[in-house]
Image: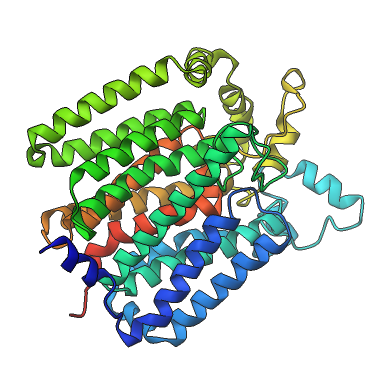
Amino acid sequence: MTRRASRRDILAVIPQNERMLLGATLLMIVTLVLLGGAAPQPGLNMAAIFFSGILLLATLFFGAGFAVFRSIPTAVILVVLAPLLLTLAQLIPLPPEIWQAMPGQALRLQALGLIDLADSWQPISLMPIATTYSAMICLIFAGLVFALFALSERSSNIVILALATTVILSLAVGLVQFATQGVAFKFYQEAHDGPLIGFFANKNHMALIIACSNILFHYISRTIFRSSKIYLYLYLIFSSVAIVATNSRAGIILAAISIFMIFWQDFDKIRKIYFYIALVLFTLLAGFVMVSPTFDIVFERFFDSQNDVRWNFVINSLPIIKQYSLLGYGTGSFSTLYITQEAVQSLSPVYVNQLHNDYLQLFIEGGILGVLMLLGTAVAMFVAVRRGLRNEATRRLTWLGFSIILLFALHSILDYPLRRPAALVFFAVAFSYAFRPLVRRNG
């Protein structure tokens, strides 16, 4: 297939029964990326996200997309809905005899007693409003995954192109931010100043998305446009420069892993001339970066781990894990719990909103059920990825999904990318493609 024919194929007319669903999916993706880069706050951002989510769900359930549920195994449906079901269960009011008998309720009981509500029905969640928001995001996540299941491969390629376009736009914005030391394009009041952050408030989340974009552009170059690999290598060089501008240590490591995975998959197909060109370009890039002032800052941070407060967050959270991990205490409740348990000697002006380890935080907020949900998802994903990689028709899309999920899994050890909608959308797309081999396609 020629390059021109391939591009005509991408721009070909989408089937009538997919047009509205594809449009709603693209609107949801763009809204999440542009408006969901920070902690949730009541306002136009959240209103726009929830409106787009309602539109997507309505299009899915009342349009032709609803038929996709007949082709999805029950186990996969449960995996997709598990976070939503767990979060909703945490909002169910319990009689006082039950919630008062749960561990760690003394402070809650005392506070409610001051307003004569000690004997009222209360949910598991200590922060019902935050948990309700989480439930709505879980619903949007599930709707997006099911919508992606319903789309054809052609429409899925358009989704990937749209997602890659948002990355390019975010990088363009981020370069201006970096050049102006955070003066221009500051979308959030509480955001990192100076580094390249794009549409995010946190440089580490932007860095993760840049690493994921390497996988996206590899798929686009290899599968959609089937263009010369030199364009892919040029983008990898560009993204490598951008990742340094984020000043994110984790991001640099994740970007290196993503590039390694690309070359690992394509090593036997790379012409030697391209390999040598890429080697020379990356060597020149490394030399340029190493003599730049920006690299000096990043390099110093790699050897300044003793000042990293993430480990302190974990240490201070050990009593919470011991006391509250049986049943969990509601998604979004960590900050409230942490304040009540933080040691006096650890107090600082820094507000701890997340644990910076999503696995331990899931244990705290979701309890044993949250851990079982994670393990069940991992097992189901292993089955799906194994099947997808064995099938020539689904191998590339499965590899894309698996690679991005791996980057998220690694980053979640030190951060909380899934708690920001703008990053969650990349995970949702990857998640759907990883499980796509288990979905029976009709034609």
Q: Position of residue 323 (x, y in %)?
A: 62, 37
Residue 238: name its quadrant.
Answer: top left
Q: Position of residue 46 (x, y in %)?
A: 66, 62
- Nearest the viewer among 429 and 88 is 429
Residue positioned 22% across, 71% down in the render: 9
Residue positioned 66% across, 60% down in the render: 45
Compared to residue 259, the image places residue 380 above or below, namely below
Residue positioned 41% across, 16% down in the render: 290
Lateral position of residue 210 relative to residue 247, left or right: left
Q: In this figure, which colouring scheme has been used for the structure?
A: rainbow
- Nearest the viewer among 301 and 118 is 301
Compared to residue 37, the image places residue 42 above or below, namely below
Residue positioned 73% across, 45% down in the render: 105
- Nearest the viewer among 41 and 67 is 41
Lateral position of residue 255 relative to residue 359, left or right: left
Q: Which image quarter is the C terminus in?
A: bottom left
Is there any visible trace of residue 80 in the rendered image? Answer: yes
- Nearest the viewer among 161 and 82 is 161
Q: Position of residue 259 (x, y in %)?
A: 28, 35
Q: Which image quarter is the N terminus in?
A: bottom left
Is there any visible trace of residue 197 in the rendered image? Answer: no
